[in-house]
Amino acid sequence: QVQLVESGGGLVQAGGSLRLSCTASGSISAVNAMGWYRQAPGKQRELVAGITSSGSTNYADSVKGRFTISRGNPKNLVYLQMNSLKPEDTAVYYCYARTTSFVAWGQGTQVTVSS
């Protein structure tokens, strides 16, 4: 099992920045990728950004150039630096950790961007 704890959400004005953090514990040696999804009210959950154990990253087109995902040291930490935030970035952001047999999810952290 892998447990995930997120932090760093909040309320920010459009154009502002936030940094989300996610800490993994448990069977972290089995994790081959971590990242973030988000879900806005009335919408499906969507991938925001991911990073593999080798450091490869991928981003949703809507956040490219504004968001940066990175891993901390030790590597059970993942960060999402969000710059130039827009009202459409408002959502609950969920950290995930993927293994070969399951995906673990965090409890979610609310990000609200006011116009």
Image (cartoon, rainbow, N blue to C red):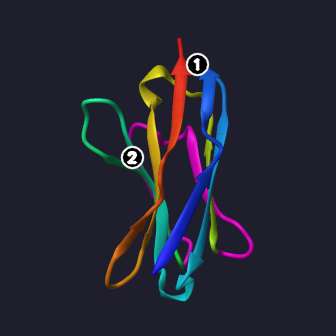
The answer to whether any part of residue 57 appears in the image is: no
Q: Residue 102 location in percent, x, y?
A: 33, 78
- Residue at screen point 42% across, 25% down: 88
Q: Is residue 20 left or right of residue 94?
A: right
Residue 112 falls within the magenta-colored stretch: no
Asked whether disc 2 touches disc 1, contact meaning CB atoms under 8 Å apart, the reply is no
The span shown in magenta is: 54-75
Q: Residue 12 location in percent, x, y?
A: 63, 24
By secondary structure, the bulk of the magenta-drawn segment is best described as loop
Seen in the picture, residue 85 relative to 82 is either above or below; the reply is above
Q: Earlier in the sequence, mark 2 or mark 1?
A: 1
Q: Nearer the viewer, mark 2 or mark 1?
A: 1
Can you identify the residue that label 2 sits on?
Answer: 60
- Residue at screen point 25% across, 30% down: 42
Residue 74 falls within the magenta-colored stretch: yes
- For mark 2, does the 10 Å Cα neighbourhood hold few (<14), some (14 to 19), or many (20 or more) residues? few
Can you identify the residue that label 1 sits on?
Answer: 14
Q: Residue 16 location in percent, x, y?
A: 66, 25
- Residue at screen point 53% across, 78% down: 53
| Label 1: which secondary element | loop
Q: Residue 8 location in percent, x, y?
A: 65, 44
| Label 2: which secondary element | loop
Question: At label 2, which amino acid type do we have?
Answer: Ala
Q: Quadrant of the N terminus?
A: bottom left
Residue 26 falls in which quadrant of the image?
Answer: bottom right
Seen in the picture, residue 110 relative to 84 is either above or below; the reply is below
- Residue at screen point 46% across, 30% down: 89
Q: Nearer the viewer, residue 62 or 34?
A: 34
Question: At label 1, which amino acid type do we have?
Answer: Ala
- For mark 1, does the 10 Å Cα neighbourhood hold few (<14), some (14 to 19), or many (20 or more) residues? some
